[in-house]
Amino acid sequence: MRKRMSLKRAAAWGTIFAMTAGVMSGCSAKKEASVTTQETKKEETSQTAETETKTEGKSYTDYSKGFPEKVTIKIPVYDRGFEGWDPANNYYTNWIQKEFGDKYNVTVQYVAINRQKEIADYMQMIAAGNAPDIIYHYDMPQAVNYNSEGAMQELDLDEIKYYAPDYYKNAEKIINQYGKLDGKNTFFFAQRNPIYYNWVTLIRQDWLDKVGKQKPATREELQEAAKAWKEAGLGKLGAQIVNKSYTYEYPFISSSPDKKELNLYLDLNVAPLTWSATKAYLKTTNQEFNDGILDPEFYLNADDAAWKADFVAGNVGTYSFYLSSNTDVISSLKANDPGAEVSVLSPTALSPKDSHPYYYKYPPYGMIMGINSKTDEKQRAAVWMFLNWMSQPENLFYLQNGVEGANYTLDSDKIAVPVKDFKGESKLSNNNNKDYWCLVTEMTDYGDEAKNLKANTRMLAPAGYEDLVKQSYDYAKEVEQYGLISPIFTKSVASTGEYAADLTAMWQEFYVDMITCKPEELDAKYEAYCKEYLDNGYQEILDEKQKLIDSGDFIAQ
């Protein structure tokens, strides 16, 4: 029986926690699905040249010449707050409508999803019955949680294969391995050829030079550099509040982790407060706060933009984000401080010297997608046709690079070379249009690592800062053996869906309090908060996950 929750929130935190009270999550995944071969028989059925194809007792209507009546599909797209960019109405959404929609008598309606509030946005739309036809998320636990809300329908894999043969050929292996939930075909996926050098932590190299410090290689060296910054009247270490995608603990996992603990505690959806790795993180961060080297108001940074603003203003000397060639963080920083210089911090600088630089390793899929339970047969067919259209190399290349001769030129290796400072009508979004083509793939791929690095350097590095990508690539190679994939469950973890929102709110209050308290108070607070956390749902989550692990209902990594 769950205890009635009693959160002793201090008034100072009330506004912060209310901002994220709607955050929900879940945890699970898939195994195998088999796909039968198709034997087709076509018949003329209408003046629009529709045909019906029978596949082992199943019938599919041929819409290759267009739908007889207008079909509208709603496609989600992240709204990242790029200045001057309308994610639902721009050159590329209009191009998609012209090239795909008009050809097949389909209206492609993009639905903007706030990237910082995506879970709340989706949950509100699901509750109101107006969610997009594709419901997606980058993390399996939350995708499972959407399904647990009754938001997704069971998939017919033969149907996908019929309407989207090229897309299905690319994604079939992933769908077969990970697409089932509770024994039903539920998810389909974008491909992922993962890279790890696009996520970077910038550090003020000019500040390091001013205090005579080498670039830190361990957490202890980073702390020493920050203490020197403090003494020199410079800035502090940057951070933002942790309230989702819980990977904060990875650098603090012991050098010889217990695989049973990894399976039980690694969870993007619920913070593993009671795990020893979390306690190590809290002790380290508490000390940094009390030493005056951590941004004392880190908990006010509710999103990336707030941390970025602190970095640009010179208040903090570190900033973590996804690097892209269109980013304005460096130019804005230099506009405020012409002498500012940045470099990339090694992942090892986030780990104590007696640990390893563990990091979240991506599973072999990209975006996790389901079909809205309210989507009808024709809309579903149009969605599959849309994915197949986007999977064509020429269409994907256009979305990723723009117009040849305007946005880019081709070099001798047929790799796109972006035109510097291009501001024309076909300008890509600030993350190179990824929020459109992420439906089929996570990265550009030229089929060769050296070519991919060359291409990604152009996509990721602001002009004149190509070495940042090279630094990050080298660091990623150094630590690649330390990647850890979260366990993927093949059945729903019902207790996660039930308690995740409450535990998220509790976690935020508890961890901020423990970081900002006096060091001598931390142990007692930690013990009390762990008990309350366990009593209010976390113990049930751990127990349910352990049962699934014991019964083999998860995919071991």
Image (cartoon, rainbow, N blue to C red):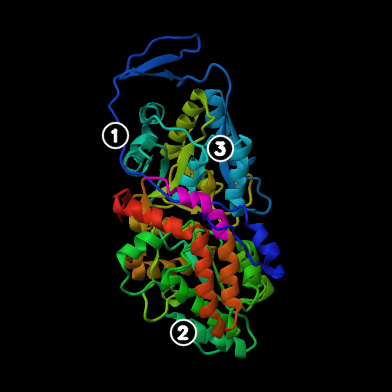
Q: Is residue 410 visible?
A: no
> Residue 195: percent from the left, percent from the top?
40, 58
Q: Could you say which is closer to the camera, residue 157 or residue 329?
A: 157
The amino acid type of the residue labelled 1 equals Ser
> Residue 310: percent from the left, percent from the top?
65, 71
Span of residues in magenta? 491-504
Is the C-beta separation of discs 1 and 2 under 8 Å? no
Q: With respect to residue 515, does 155 lie above or below?
A: above
> Marks 1 and 2, Cα distance to the nearest angstrom?
52 Å
> Marks 3 and 1, Cα distance to the nearest angstrom?
27 Å
**SS at badge 3:** strand
Q: Could you say which is closer to the camera, residue 273 or residue 143?
A: 273
Is the C-beta separation of discs 3 and 1 under 8 Å? no
Neighbour tally class for label 3: few under 14, some 14-19, many 20 plus, Cα within 10 Å: many
> Residue 85: percent from the left, percent from the top?
65, 49
Please report whichever mark, 3 or 2, sits nearer to the chain's N-terminal start: 3
- Residue 138 part of the magenta-drawn span: no
Q: With respect to residue 129, does 205 lie above or below?
A: below
User: Disc 2 marks which residue?
Assistant: 221
The amino acid type of the residue labelled 3 equals Ile
**SS at badge 2:** helix
User: Disc 3 marks which residue?
Assistant: 75
Is the C-beta separation of discs 3 and 2 under 8 Å? no
Say the numbered circle drawn on residue 34: 1
Q: With respect to residue 69, does 429 lie above or below?
A: below
